[in-house]
Amino acid sequence: MTIRLLTSFLLGLPLLGFCKKTELKVVDFFKANCELDSNSRRQIRERVIAKKRNPDNVEMRIGVWAICCADFKPVAKLQMDTLFLDVEDTHLKSPCECSCYYQFTYKIKGLKSDPLEIKFGNRRIDLSNERYLTYAPLYRLVGGDTVDRVDKYGLRQGKWMTSHDSLFISEYYVYNDGLISAKVDLFSSGKVKRETIREILKETNSESHYGGLRTIIEYYDSGVKKRQCQLDVHDMGLCKEWDDKGSLIYEGSFRK
């Protein structure tokens, strides 16, 4: 029995040493300003943005979500070829309900080789040039057209059909970065009957949203333009109307 216990203990020694966490030294730490980017339709990716090996340390910049009211102290540990990065709140403030996307830069001493895996708060993060999560693009081919397209960020783009019955298409939508930029109604012949185009505004942070204006264009079944109006949210605006020969017959306030 004694020999068996001793053998088990000796065999377990290498394993205990292998599982041990190695405390690394963070010689410098930088925190970028909180980025309030949570309203974007794209999903921000937690990632390693850049890493560089210097003569006496490794510099690593990561983009991660963290609470927005903490005083951060950097943490770096190595275990079984996995680098664990984290931050601790030095003042132990009451937890906040808000979170921000931060860029943290760690300068780490004692990391002799590149880890196989990097984690932040036990969440795996990989080196990526993509700020947002990406997916396999999707689309359908209908009558030679590419429709129902989803881009690599998961956003709808281009023409989207309201029915999967390609023989009887009465309307479709046009998407721009997940927002409906136009609704198109068709005659039974397939020609455009009416276009309703919504104003999409782009802010300085590249996030698009709807504006207050929309343009309505109606057509005769011959394809000649019948009416064009620009309206606000209260259906107030100016219109032009043409006869089926293309001659202007009215210009003034919108009338139903």
Image (tube, rainbow, N blue to C red):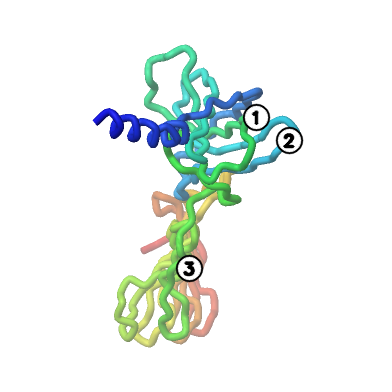
Q: In the rendering, at what x and y percent does residue 58 appear?
A: 66, 34
**Disc number placed over residue 189 in the picture, else none:** none
Give the spatial CA distance, label 1 vs label 2. Answer: 9 Å
| Residue nearer the viewer, 35 or 115 | 115
Nearer the observer, 44 or 221:
44
Element type at marker 3?
strand
Q: CA distance from mark 2 to mark 3?
A: 47 Å
Query: Pointer 1 and pointer 2: residues touching (CB < 8 Å)?
Result: yes
Residue indicated by mark 2: 54
Which of the marked residues, 1 or 3, is nearer the chain's N terminus?
A: 1
* Nearest to the observer: residue 234 or residue 146: 146
Q: Which residue is mark 1?
A: 107
> Residue 65 vs residue 131: left or right?
left
Give the class, few, some or many, for how many residues have Cα within 10 Å of label 1's Cα (few <14, many ≥20).
Answer: many
Q: Residue at x 35, y 31 (%)?
A: 9
> Residue at coordinates 65% horizontally, 24% vertically from top-left?
28
Q: Amino acid at mark 3?
A: Gly
In front: 33, or 214? 33
Q: Residue furthest right?
A: 55
Q: Of the numbered discs in the image, which one, if any, rests on residue 158?
A: 3
